[in-house]
């Protein structure tokens, strides 16, 4: 399923020259204290270019989910700084962080992405409603058509397949036009066909709509949809890969010993 | 298996506590009732034992229907018995003490008490000394305090012919738990003065020191019993114990209501817990537990919860009982405060009821637990609550059965039965049956009701409120049980409120229509049931005053009609039909001529007569035939056989009226009229003046008081139901951990998350209260209609609205802790929550 977005045009200029959409500077995260302390992140510094699709990979326990949580303002960092756009989120209050997520960040989680009490349409519009923003009807229609949910809008999550549920989650992330979308194993619960569809949307939303996506995954095929893959091990960024294919990703993972 | 259950409980102490709390409160109330009444009983026993210990023998009249007292002459005979060193007769009479305003105190005259000196004195002297001689008096300490009388002061007491006598107060006494003294106040005289003041021909009791029982009994004669001191104490305690039994029974009714609500809360909590621990249960089944073992483990858990809750409840009960005792005494009661204790019976009843209710409530959830398939352990997508609920046909049939049966019985009680108490009981039974139907139907009502209740919060509360309304509907059974627990308390409260308001409206309407007088003058009630009258001269005096347009005297005399006792009454000429207008069921005021009588429906029934019949009544001229000219409804405060004024004069030699009614002339100021009537009544200290406004006020206050007490007692049931709401929410919060985290990630602030749970609690509480109010008003109407022909149905809208608002607020209060818990949770940890 391929589609073309009519608007808006891709972000202008070369991605590398513009300031990154999200940036981590010397970020450390320690859970617990003393002997029981777990260093989930050890001085991670990384930037995610505007209008790019970046995947974060690494073996279990490498700190990839923690990094994403810290980048998205869901968790606080022990040391270092995180910026989203022009906003320094380190040290923000819970309320400020909540507002920031509401206005500038979109999420697609692995599971339990949707509220069971709301219909697909209500789920898609939820972030806008929370922010008290009027949905742009034309944009909504366009997103809904792209993810192919037109005839499913009135259904509740329990009446949708896993793939459909993730597509609703993608639509929700897109419809608010956030500065960055964080996706945490978005295809982890899907079969390969449904997974490919979801990844296709994510990629085309970057290529054709200029969105910025940071995706955590452990699946080399999923990672290959990205423009760039960042590899983490033991809380550090060890290497990265541009224009990945499943094979190059797999090779790199093997070399990491993951 | 038992170990697994116990280990599970240990791991979830908070859960255990929350579940047990409902039981704790219910058992606490029941135990508190026992503690309170036991302590009162014990104190009463001790006091009687102490005072009766001073008596060797007591001569009392043989108990029977016409117990007359011990003739005064017996005293001299007893004193003559060899070995008797001292004997005193105790008076049971009245001695109206005049207050500072020159009026006899209270609605009933103060009691006259014999206060002997020496060993037979059984009262405690608080101040001063015991009286001796014809000019000395002692006062009950509390009466003296209220009227600010002190030792050394002069007071006036009326003798048995209402003649004022001056006395000097020489002491203040604590008459203890003496029933007369505590309700009416008391004055005490030395034995001779007591006899003179009351004109008594009999004693209530003769106390004896020394002497032989048989000899005293011979001297006292066959009509008397002779008791030892201990037997006397036991007899006195028995009669006092009857009161505590009534209090206990009344309080226990509310205890049962509270336990019923507790049962609902526990049933619900266990159901939710089982649903949430589905995977745990399935895992148990996977590793080889049989269905029976799963069932047993849930029941074992309920036994522990019940036991812990009940034990805590006993402690709470001890506190409640002692607290209530202290509170009553603070409010002016005079209860003995000897240490509150838990009797073995209280412990047994408390534990039994608590554990039994818990276990019975857990049976259905335990059965549900056995139906969980082992494979459920492997499923990961256990989404709680789909929001769908279908009223299956068994439920439909059962609900329809109870609702229709309840409605049918209620309809019969309301319309098909003779008005009165029995019809009201039938309506009450109908209410219970109907309520069963509502319980069964409730899950199906949750959706429409939460839409209705949630409409406003959904409009003004934004996204969180709308989510909350959706959440309230997602587990209809759970919401239904949570809310119905609240319905019980609020429903009963509204029912009482409606009945009380209707009762007030009814009495007001009656006063307006049938009894349009402004003032009523009556004598103090006589405690011994003797006829009490106001002097005719007062009526004459009032007729001379220009402030009054009409003065009516109502006279009455108890006599016999055939074998039945009946009151023959009369009103001053011209009063009937002009001022006092009864509604006739048959016959009319026009047929009311010499030789006839009118009567109310109750008397007509008691005498088995109807209009046109003739009854023979005993008069001073012998038996006289009287034809019934009409029967009126029970809507006027006139009962018995009403005969014409002139006839009454021929039949009886009774000139003084029982009541005088006076109507103020148009244009006369109410205060001026009041002054006039008080001036006229000044020579008659026992004449009590009441205005219609005052009577209304009094009725209204009395009704409000009862309503308040009922409300307070039902408050417990409401509080337990609120714990139920808190419980359900806490468990829902746990269940929706991941969902809450998702919402927070998407931009829901902590405050919005808290508000979401508050609104959910609000919706649940209001659904419960609303259902209760609807039922309460409905059955309040039925009960009011069944109560009396002249009932006036009134809904106290302010109060009812207050109930709903309060329930809503309380519900939000119940949500505070669960909401804090939800808001505090870390998003990242919650997202990973399983």
Image (cartoon, coloured by chain):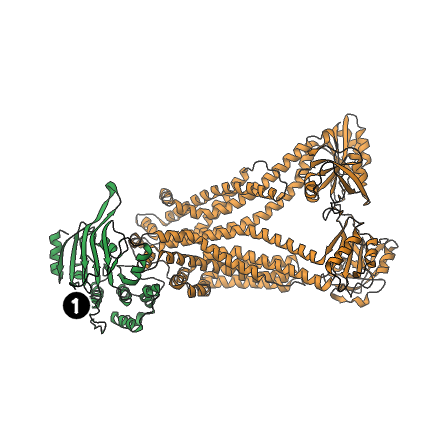
Chain colours: A green, B orange
Q: Is residue B508 visible?
A: yes
- Give the position of the N terminus of chain B as an image quadrant: top left
**Horizontal side of residue B182 vs B473, given as left or right:** right
**Figure check: B56 above or below B535:** above
**Horizontal side of residue B483 vs B330, given as left or right:** left
Spot occupied by residue B740 in the image (x, y as percentages of width and height): 34, 57
**Figure check: A256 above or below B113:** below
**Figure check: B736 above or below B86:** below
Residue B305 location, quadrant = top left
Residue B617 location, quadrant = bottom right
User: Where is mark 1, residue-wise?
Assistant: A13
Residue nearest the observer in this picture, A64 or B139: B139
Which type of secondary structure does the marked residue at label 1 adopt?
loop
Disc 1 packing (10 Å; few <14; some 14–19; many ≥20): few
**Horizontal side of residue B83 vs B428, given as left or right:** right
Chain of the residue under the numbered disc 1 shown in the image: A
Residue nearest the observer in this picture, B775 or B323: B323
Task: Tell me the residue at 42%/59% (across/down).
Answer: B760
Q: So how many labels did they put on this image?
A: 1
Spot occupied by residue B116 in the image (x, y as percentages of width and height): 75, 32
Spot occupied by residue A35 in the image (x, y as percentages of width and height): 24, 41
């Amino acid at each position: 399923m391929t589609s073309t977005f009519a608007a808006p045009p891709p972000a202008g200029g070369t991605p590398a020259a513009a300031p990154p959409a999200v940036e981590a500077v010397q970020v450390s995260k320690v859970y617990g204290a003393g002997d029981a302390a777990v260093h989930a992140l050890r001085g991670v510094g990384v930037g995610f270019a505007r209008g790019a699709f970046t995947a974060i990979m690494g073996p279990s326990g490498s700190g990839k989910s923690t990094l994403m949580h810290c980048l998205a303002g869901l968790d606080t960092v022990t040391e270092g700084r995180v910026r989203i756009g022009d906003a320094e989120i380190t040290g923000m209050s819970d309320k400020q962080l909540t507002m920031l997520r509401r206005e500038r960040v979109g999420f697609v989680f692995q599971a339990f992405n949707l509220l069971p009490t709301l219909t697909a349409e209500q789920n898609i519009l939820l972030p806008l409603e929370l922010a008290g923003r009027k949905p742009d009807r034309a944009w909504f229609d366009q997103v809904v058509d792209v993810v192919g949910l037109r005839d499913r809008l009135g259904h509740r999550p329990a009446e949708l397949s896993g793939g459909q549920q993730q597509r609703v989650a993608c639509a929700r992330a897109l419809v608010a036009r956030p500065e960055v979308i964080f996706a945490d194993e978005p295809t982890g619960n899907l079969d390969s066909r449904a997974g490919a569809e979801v990844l296709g949307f994510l990629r085309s939303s970057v290529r054709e709509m200029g969105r910025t996506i940071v995706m955590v995954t452990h699946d080399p095929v999923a990672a290959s949809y990205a423009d760039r893959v960042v590899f983490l091990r033991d809380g550090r960024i060890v290497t990265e890969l541009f224009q990945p294919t499943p094979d190059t990703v797999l090779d790199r993972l093997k070399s990491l010993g993951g | 298996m038992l170990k697994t259950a116990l280990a599970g409980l240990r791991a979830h102490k908070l859960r255990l506590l929350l579940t047990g709390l409902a039981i704790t409160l219910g058992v606490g109330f029941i135990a508190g009732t026992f503690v309170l009444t036991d302590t009162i009983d014990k104190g009463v026993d001790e006091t009687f034992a102490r005072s009766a210990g001073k008596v060797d023998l007591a001569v009392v009249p043989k108990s029977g229907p016409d117990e007359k007292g011990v003739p005064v002459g017996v005293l001299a005979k007893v004193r003559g018995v060899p070995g008797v060193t001292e004997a005193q007769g105790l008076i049971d009479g009245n001695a109206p003490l005049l207050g500072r305003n020159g009026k006899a105190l209270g609605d009933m005259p103060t009691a006259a008490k014999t206060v002997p000196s020496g060993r037979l004195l059984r009262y405690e002297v608080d101040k001063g000394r015991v009286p001796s001689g014809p000019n000395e008096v002692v006062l009950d300490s509390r009466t003296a305090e209220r009227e600010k009388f002190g030792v050394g002061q002069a007071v006036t007491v009326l003798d048995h012919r209402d003649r004022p006598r001056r006395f000097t107060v020489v002491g203040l006494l604590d008459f203890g738990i003496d029933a007369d003294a505590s309700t009416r106040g008391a004055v005490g005289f030395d034995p001779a003065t007591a006899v003179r003041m009351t004109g008594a021909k009999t004693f209530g009791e003769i106390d004896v020191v020394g002497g032989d029982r048989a000899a005293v009994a011979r001297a006292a004669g066959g009509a008397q019993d002779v008791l030892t001191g201990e037997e006397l104490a036991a007899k006195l305690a028995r009669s006092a114990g009857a009161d505590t039994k009534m209090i206990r029974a009344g309080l226990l009714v509310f205890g049962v209501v509270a336990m019923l609500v507790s049962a609902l809360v526990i049933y619900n909590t266990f159901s939710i817990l089982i649903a949430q621990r589905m995977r745990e249960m399935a895992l148990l089944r996977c590793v080889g537990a049989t269905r029976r073992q799963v069932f047993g483990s849930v029941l074992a858990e309920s036994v522990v919860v019940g036991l812990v809750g009940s034990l805590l409840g006993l402690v709470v009960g001890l506190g409640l009982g002692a607290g209530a005792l202290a509170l009553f005494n603070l409010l002016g009661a005079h209860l003995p405060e000897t240490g509150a204790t838990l009797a073995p019976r209280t412990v047994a009843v408390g534990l039994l009821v608590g554990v039994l209710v818990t276990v019975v409530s857990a049976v259905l959830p335990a059965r549900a637990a056995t139906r969980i398939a082992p494979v459920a352990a492997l499923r990961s997508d256990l989404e709680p609550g789909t929001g769908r609920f279908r009223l299956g046909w068994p439920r439909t049939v059962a609900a329809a059965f109870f609702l229709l049966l309840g409605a049918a019985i209620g309809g019969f009680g309301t319309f098909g039965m003779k008005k009165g108490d029995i019809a009201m009981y039938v309506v009450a039974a109908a209410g219970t049956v109907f309520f069963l139907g509502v319980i069964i139907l409730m899950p199906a009502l949750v959706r429409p009701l939460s839409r209705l209740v949630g409409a406003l919060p959904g409009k003004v509360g934004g996204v969180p409120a709308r989510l909350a309304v959706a959440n309230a509907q997602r587990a209809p059974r759970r919401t239904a049980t949570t809310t119905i627990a609240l319905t019980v308390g609020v429903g009963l409260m509204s029912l009482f409120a409606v009945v009380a308001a209707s009762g007030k409206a009814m009495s007001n309407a009656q006063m307006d229509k049938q009894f349009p007088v402004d003032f009523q003058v009556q004598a103090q009630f006589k405690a011994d049931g003797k006829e009490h009258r106001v002097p005719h001269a007062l009526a004459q005096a009032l007729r001379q005053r220009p402030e009054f347009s009409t003065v009516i005297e109502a006279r009455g005399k108890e006599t016999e009609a055939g074998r039945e006792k009946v009151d023959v009454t009369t009103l001053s000429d011209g009063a009937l039909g002009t001022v006092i207008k009864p509604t006739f069921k048959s016959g009319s005021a026009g047929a009311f001529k010499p030789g006839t009588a009118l009567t109310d429906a109750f008397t007509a029934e008691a005498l088995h007569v109807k209009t046109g019949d003739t009854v023979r009544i005993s008069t001073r001229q012998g038996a006289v035939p009287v034809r019934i000219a009409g029967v009126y409804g029970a809507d006027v405060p006139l009962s018995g056989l009403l005969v014409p004024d002139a006839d009454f004069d021929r039949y009886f030699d009774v000139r003084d009226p029982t009541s005088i009614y006076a109507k103020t002339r148009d244009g006369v100021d109410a205060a001026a009229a009041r002054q006039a009537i008080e001036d006229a009544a000044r020579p008659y200290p026992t004449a009590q003046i009441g205005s219609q406004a005052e009577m209304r006020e009094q009725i209204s206050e009395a009704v409000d008081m009862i309503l308040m007490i009922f409300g307070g007692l039902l408050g417990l049931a409401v509080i337990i139901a609120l714990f139920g709401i808190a419980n359900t929410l806490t468990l829902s919060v746990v269940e929706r951990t991941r969902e809450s985290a998702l919402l927070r990630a998407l931009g829901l602030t902590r405050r919005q998350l808290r508000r979401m749970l508050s609104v959910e609690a609000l919706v649940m509480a209001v659904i419960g209260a609303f259902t209760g109010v609807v039922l309460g008003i409905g059955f309040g109407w039925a009960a009011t209609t069944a109560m009396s022909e002249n009932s006036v149905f009134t809904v106290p809208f302010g109060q009812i609205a207050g109930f709903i608002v309060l329930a809503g607020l309380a519900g939000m209060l119940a949500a505070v802790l669960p909401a804090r818990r939800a808001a505090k949770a870390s998003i990242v940890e919650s997202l990973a929550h399983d």
